[in-house]
Image: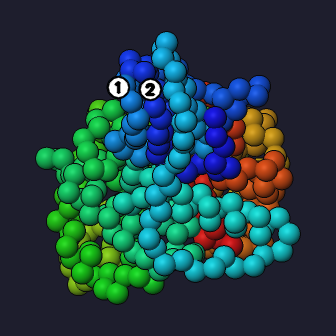
Amino acid sequence: MYDLGESRACLGVAELTAAGGERLLISYAEKLRDGDCLLPDPETYCRMRPTDRFTLRPGRQRVEGFTPRGARYLVFALEGGGVAHAARFAVRLPVTPVVKKPVPKREGVLQGVAEMCRRTTLNCLQDGFVDGVWRESSLWLGDAVAQDWALRAISDDARPLLFAIDMAAEGADAEGLLPSVLPGEVPAYAVTDYNFSWVELLAGCATHPGVAEPESVWQRHWGVLTRMLERMATFRGSDGLLRNPPGRRLFLDWSPMSRAEPNLTLNLRYLHALRLAAGLADRVGRRADWAEQAGELAAALQGHRATESWRESPGGEAASQLGLALLILTGMVSGDEARALADRIVARSLDLRDGPLPGQPTLASPFMHHYLFLALQQLGRRKDIHAIIAARWGRWVREGRPTTPENWSIDFPDGSACHGFSAHPLGWL
């Protein structure tokens, strides 16, 4: 068993002499539990068994898998009655060639956070962004928003961003909705809210130092953008609010927030996308009614406002931390109300208890803290952003984690210890 020190895309290699008929197993794992390497059971969460099996022939031979895996720990095991002689083991570590800028120097634990996030960002970069190296190792459309934010802090290379945009556009279905795992058709993982992430990626081209002509990107995908938003509008009810399309997954967040419909957070993601799309139309001189649609949607969302607070659904649970952030980000609240919501957001994140707390909004995942930080930045509260990063991501540094996990707790069997979307603080630092 070998420890690489951090989760990496990798490929185990063995050179050995065998009698013939033995089986060599090369297993890939990310975590230890009670001192033992945790190899997942395919009957659990992700239905995966990251082990390559080889039947050996007599004599000296080199054994190498066909495709890279991902792991921190590699386990080589030999089964059978033969004897292997003079075995040598190696690991291939592929690296994506991007021109990197140095991590800016920060005080105290923030420096450790920046370095942890930098490692994660680069390790979750292959042909494009991948969510994590060990489990799916796939390009998820929504994940790319936070991953692009992190990568542009250390590289001006826009290829991963443009790759995500292009792959999503090429995978649009006959009705105009976009896939979520790129490239490919994976209906069980077609996430509604990731359609809006794609609009955010398009808009992000305007500020990316590596995109010389963002207007050309928008023009190239104008038909896809128009069809997607036209199709999404058909799922608005008589009250003007969006419902989750049939057969699509309503993700919102990894947190246990309410998904009752009509959902506040989903409609705020939609509102944010409509306003961004309207801005793109203005930039390229095209006619669109997205600003008008956004105004109608904002008016309809007033039904989620209760006397004492906002609700995830009319008469339902109190708004989550993510919902509160999106209220600020979309301009649904302003002035004293926005500042009061920001105070609640900051207080919840600085309380390091991760479970539900009475009277406090549902804690957003590390991933969705990116939107919390966007909202706080809109109010000029960068000190609060850094305080949250120091408290929550700093906790991981103090625990000795080399990379950012996918959630506050990854105790479940297939919880990933290296997830790119959790590394977005690199961009905020």
Query: Could one spot residue 342 in this view of the protein?
Result: no
Horizontal placement of 117 versus 85: left or right? Answer: right
Horizontal placement of 219 versus 139: left or right? Answer: left
Q: Secondary structure at mark 1?
A: loop
Q: Which residue lies at the image location 54% right of the left edge and 42% below the top edge?
A: 89
Among the 4 quarters of the image, the one containing residue 153:
bottom right
Q: Which one is earlier in the sequence, the residue at label 1 or at label 2?
A: 2
In the image, residue 376 sits, relative to residue 407, either above or below, namely below
Which colour style is shown?
rainbow
Using the image as rendered, state which of residue 314 and residue 177 is in the foreground: 177
Horizontal placement of 203 versus 109: left or right? Answer: left
Name the kind of residue labelled 2 in the image: Ala
Q: Position of residue 176 (x, y in %)?
A: 19, 52
Horizontal placement of 143 versus 340: left or right? Answer: left
Label pair 1/2, CB-CB below 8 angstroms: yes
Residue neighbourhood size for the residue with mark 2, other residues' Cα within 10 Å, grouped as few (<14), some (14–19), many (≥20): many
Q: Position of residue 360 (x, y in %)?
A: 75, 43
Q: Secondary structure at mark 2?
A: strand
Residue that mark 2 sits on = 18
Query: Could one spot residue 113 in this view of the protein?
Result: yes
Name the kind of residue labelled 1 in the image: Arg
Residue that mark 1 sits on = 57
Q: Which residue lies at the image location 82% right of the left edge and 64% below the top edge?
A: 109
Quarter holding the N terminus is: top right
Q: Position of residue 330 (x, y in %)?
A: 51, 65
Quarter holding the C terminus is: bottom right
In the image, residue 126 sits, relative to residue 235, either above or below, namely below
